Amino acid sequence: MIAFFLYCLSFIFYMISYGGKRWRNNDTQTHTKRWSLVAFILAMAGFVTHITYFFTRWIGSNQVPTSNMYEFMAFMGLVIMLVFIIMTAIYRSWVLGLFTLPLTIIILAYASVFPKEVQPLIPALKSIWLGIHVTMAALGNAFFAIGFIAGLMYLLRVIDFKGTTPKARRMERWLELMVYFIIIIIGFIIAIFAFRGVGYEAEFLLEKVSVDAKGKISTTEENIVYHLPPIFKPYNSNDIEIGTYFGLRTALFETPSWMEGVNAARKWNTIVWSLLTGSLLYGLLRLMLRRPVGSVLHRVLRKLDPEQLDEISYRAIVIGFPVYTLGALIFAMIWANIAWGRFWGWDPKEVWALITWLFYSAYLHLRLSRSWQGMNAAWLSVIGFIVVMFTLIGVNLIIAGLHSYSGVS
């Protein structure tokens, strides 16, 4: 929590640095550098407390704290900050913090949605390869995150929001769509905190029918608790107690039979709430700004050097690619063979890890052999991180698999 609030404070100072009022002598460069340094020091302080949390939790639990979704997302935020510090030290580009800090804040807020208790490891996770595989994969993803941030900043800097050509309008719409997706995640987090803050709960009784090898039919019951209002409730379940929301005391829909199971219903409910709250938040921002959100960010970044942003994005991905290859593929396959007796099993998480690797392989190929630089490379870096986030979060929300133990609460 200390790290989270220090990151928030750091972000506020970054906004003052690049968006606040200038000093009377109009010394913009001095103003920016001064407040950026304060923001960076606060970010460093947050990183120190964050890494202290990581090691104290490791010592206290006697296991690497990356075994569930809360721990993994908290660690993901930690390594993103580590890479941000490294890249800032190399390129002296203070403005990276303007976008890195919000990403870290969103990730930590998302992590807090999940149970924070130290959970005993399931047998498949009791291996030294847990720390090696997960930490290396997360570090690779952190470099991809910085590549995404620099690529997004490049697009916000160079795309002409006042352009009238079909290409310019098309680029503006696609970039605004990227901003909309980010706001959807923020809206979901706000909804979770709002309903949990008022103590909202909805409870259902789920009946499960199973048939054993001898054809004997048995029925079991399970109590299911939602912390978001149930737009969708589990298939073949009965209401026990549902808190009032918007005047309703029952679920609007029941998931169909082909989505049988508590996780399917809860995941679908989460996705719908994310779209609703994110769309509402985006609409309110558009009403307040009276212009596309991307055009406001374009004005903030108009004095940046786009070539440096392109270089930072490329270097981050170049460093992250071999780290990700080792952590997410090679070490993962070694661990899979130890835990499950096979190197590859086409589990959804494994498939999407491979898709992520193939995408960034294509990025590097096009960059090096086809000279895809500038806008083309920036779009690839942005799309690549969307693939990364779907691999980390979307697969857990939508698809069930062997890695579901790290997923939805």
Image (cartoon, grey):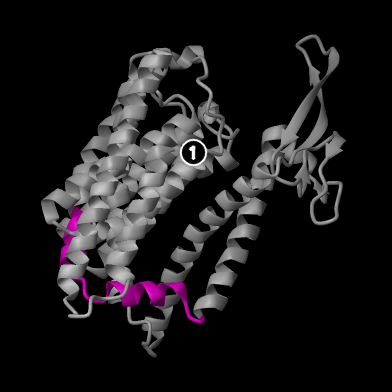
* Residue toward you, 194 or 321: 194
Q: Is residue 76 rendered to the left or right of residue 195?
A: left
Q: Is residue 161 rendered to the left or right of residue 264?
A: left
Q: Quadrant of the C terminus?
A: top right
Give the class, few, some or many, for how many residues have Cα within 10 Å of label 1's Cα (few <14, many ≥20). Answer: many
In the depicted structure, whether residue 25 falls above or below residue 114: below
Q: Residue at x 27, y 41 (%)?
A: 45
Q: Residue at x 39, y 12 (%)?
A: 62
In the depicted structure, whether residue 215 falls above or below residue 44: above
Q: Quadrant location of residue 143?
A: top left
Q: Position of residue 245 (x, y in %)?
A: 79, 51
Q: Residue at x 40, y 75 (%)?
A: 296
Residue at the outermost top position: 214
Magenta span has 313? yes
* Residue toward you, 130 or 387: 130
Mark 1 secondary-structure assignment: helix
Residue at the outermost bottom position: 164
Please provide the residue range marked out in magenta. 290-314
Q: Main secondary structure of the magenta part?
A: helix
Q: Quadrant location of residue 373?
A: bottom left
Q: Position of residue 263 (x, y in %)?
A: 67, 34
What residue would you read off at disc 1?
111
Q: Position of residue 341 (x, y in %)?
A: 43, 14
User: Count the marks: how many?
Assistant: 1
Residue 35, visible in the rendered structure: yes
Q: Residue at x 49, y 32 (%)?
A: 69
